[in-house]
Image (cartoon, helix red, strand yellow):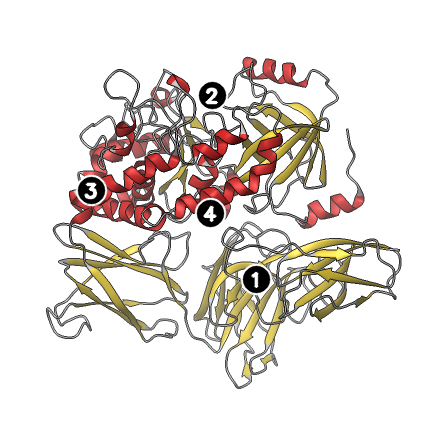
Amino acid sequence: MKQLSLVTALLIHFGISAQGLYELNNITEIKLYFDDANWDATMDTYYANDMDELLFGSCEINGVSFDSVGVAYKGNSTYNENNLKNPLKIKLAEVYSFQEYHGCQTLKLSNSFKDPSYVREVLSYEIARKYMDAPLSNYAKVFINDQYYGLFVSSESVNGDYMESRFYCDDDNTRVKCNPEYGLGSSSLEYLGADSTLYYNSYEMKSDFGWTDLVDLCYQLENNPSLIEQFLDVDAALWMLAFDNVLVNLDSYIGPLKQNYYLIRDDNGIFHPVIWDLNQSFASFTMLGGPPGPPVLSDYTDLDLFHNETDATYPLVFFLLSNPRYRKMYVAHCKTIVEENFANGEYYTRGQALQNIIATEVQSEPNGFYSYSECVANLDVSVGSGPQSVYGIKEVMDSRVTYYTNHASFNLTAPTISNIVAAPSVPEAYDVVSFTADIQNATYAYLGYRSYKADAFQKVQMFDDGLHNDGAASDGVYGVSIVLGAADIQYYIYADNNDAGMFSPERAEHEFYELTLSSGVVINEIMSSNNITAYDEYGEYNDWIELYNNSSSDVDISGYFLSDDLLIPTKWQIPAGTVIGANDYLIIWADNDGQTGLHANFKLGSGGETLLFSDALGNPINQVTYPEVHDNGTYGRYPNGTGGFIPMYATFSAENSYTSVSIEEEEVIELVVYPNPATDVFYARGIENEGETIRIFNLSGQLLMEKMIHNEEAIDISEMPSGTYLVQFTVSQQVKKLMVR
């Protein structure tokens, strides 16, 4: 097996590499090496044994090497021992727990079986992520023992890391994979009784414990549906049902097998559904559960908007859609998905773009199920014949849009929501804030708000009665007031009438508006796992908290407090004589080393926690809950000092800099460091006109140079000894390896 080099080990440890694992504009390259020449037969045997056995070998991902990784075939209908290309599961950390690539330790690769277009899964996940928490997904080309094995779809694993990063909950919370044993059960959420063994054939418990939690959810859904928001993220469930219906994704909860989703229970005791396995969306799944005989095109294009609403064996559909308000929310979500992706043809443009990315790989694939011509054609028309025929995505979805636009529920008049105002617009901690909105054609409205994604939204009714800072009664302006704490809030508005509902923003609750507290001094940036960014006066790479003074005057914060414990806000007192200059920064080291000065008596949890910044009387004036952030990444305000928090690259004691457009939404220019190896100077090709800030580190993590460069400006490295260095581009967020000789 290939051994890890020192450079590779450091890159893994620092979480740095040339290309992200799920970048849509790039194809991940995975090379597997097995000493076992009969690796295919061995993995077939392991699959047949059904004992989760792994074949061990070495692996390279985009040039980064990993030793002793475990590999296995996976899948149900997509696996067959006679296939030339089977779905793969790759476990990087099965032997060495530190091994990960961009924070991921498990890779799941599907083989595009039953998808001639090659885009169903990636495109479906991309659409889903607009409206709910759903896995990242892109393409990967796999080589085995240096032979091209095939093109795969690589989708993020719904595991403990996913739970922590998406829902900010413990990775040992209840996590259920809702896929029944074939022919033995159904992941329908029907209540089968109090005995948890009755559910074993219907669900796979992925956490160590949780059967009691799952049974209780099923019980509450059936017996207390009016209280279900205490146990289930209803909005996420409605988005999932809407998504499955619009995309004709019948290998799902709404299909005959009621499967292919996860349930994750957060620290509030609420289950969140997470959609999974989308390779047969867009009418590729041939089981409808209706009349006998193969389905025809109209069965898909005219699939009932309220499919299975009267069938109590689908309790998630039956109970949610029988609630008039939830029903209107569901229709609103369906309309949003249709209008944003299908009525405007956006799905087709994206499908073409994805096929362009993979064109070369599909044409050269040795073990594919479909030819390149079939791939291109299936975006538009059917491919294959008889039982093997797969309808074209366009022929399904264009007719599906016609079905929706002619549906009575889509043509009901919904409220309009505009002119949303929060007053004061820049509140301070503990202020009373009034929210108003111009809401026409409504009989009911509410404000949903929370402080953090880890919280459930609280809902308070808004009124148009002249008594809630809403102006005159019955003037179409609704209002409500809430009392703030010491944290920023996220909020949205929902309104309905007897016929239809409307959200603002329309992608709520997944998207929301933000209201940021005003304060002279705020927590501005948090680094909870520091290996290379900066070291303290003792030469130690400790975690740090950055404070920022928004005001134009110096602020004396002597005697103020920082704490990582909500019950003990006065845990660490800032020393006397501590002053933050106007529009300046202050670093507090969170090391618990007993050192004097700006060294707190606590450390930061790398998995996320809550920080309090309190005044000299112990009254919290700023509270921030941060999630798990990968090594040497930070959680900071953007815009600097006043904005909400987002994960970002470290900007130690400097203005926070970040682009909020994701890599999926913009074309990323790959920077090139040349010549490489270099001697006296090197250049960077691809720098935008406005310039880049580069940082050069040695492999001990020491910052050697920080410089603003423009275009292909020469960078002088004549004083650097021969060796290997890491070059960080802070704006474009790329890191390159540079050899100096």
Q: Is residue 170 visible?
A: no
**Three-letter code for the amino acid on which mark 1 is drawn:** Ile
* Quarter occupied by the C terminus: bottom right
Q: Earlier in the sequence, mark 3 or mark 1?
A: 3
Q: Earlier in the sequence, mark 2 or mark 4?
A: 2
* Image location (x, y in percent) of residue 594: 67, 63
Q: Earlier in the sequence, mark 3 or mark 4?
A: 4
Q: Are marks 2 and 3 in contact (CB under 8 Å)?
A: no
Give the CA distance from mark 2 to mark 3: 37 Å
Label 3: few (<14), some (14–19) or many (≥20) C-alpha neighbours in 10 Å? few
Q: Are marks 2 and 4 in contact (CB under 8 Å)?
A: no
* Image location (x, y in percent) of residue 412: 15, 50
Does residue 618 sit above or below 353 in this rendering?
below
Give the CA distance from mark 3 to mark 1: 40 Å
Q: Which mark is residue 76?
A: 2
Q: Nearer the viewer, mark 3 or mark 4?
A: 4
* Quarter occupied by the N terminus: top right
Q: Earlier in the sequence, mark 1 or mark 2?
A: 2
Q: Which residue is mark 3?
A: 226
Label 4: few (<14), some (14–19) or many (≥20) C-alpha neighbours in 10 Å? some
Q: Are marks 1 and 2 in contact (CB under 8 Å)?
A: no
| Local secondary structure at mark 3 | helix
Label 1: few (<14), some (14–19) or many (≥20) C-alpha neighbours in 10 Å? many
Q: Which residue is mark 1?
A: 526
Nearer the observer, 85 or 631: 85
**Three-letter code for the amino acid on which mark 4 is drawn:** Arg
Give the CA distance from mark 3 to mark 4: 27 Å
Left or right: residue 121 compared with residue 421: right
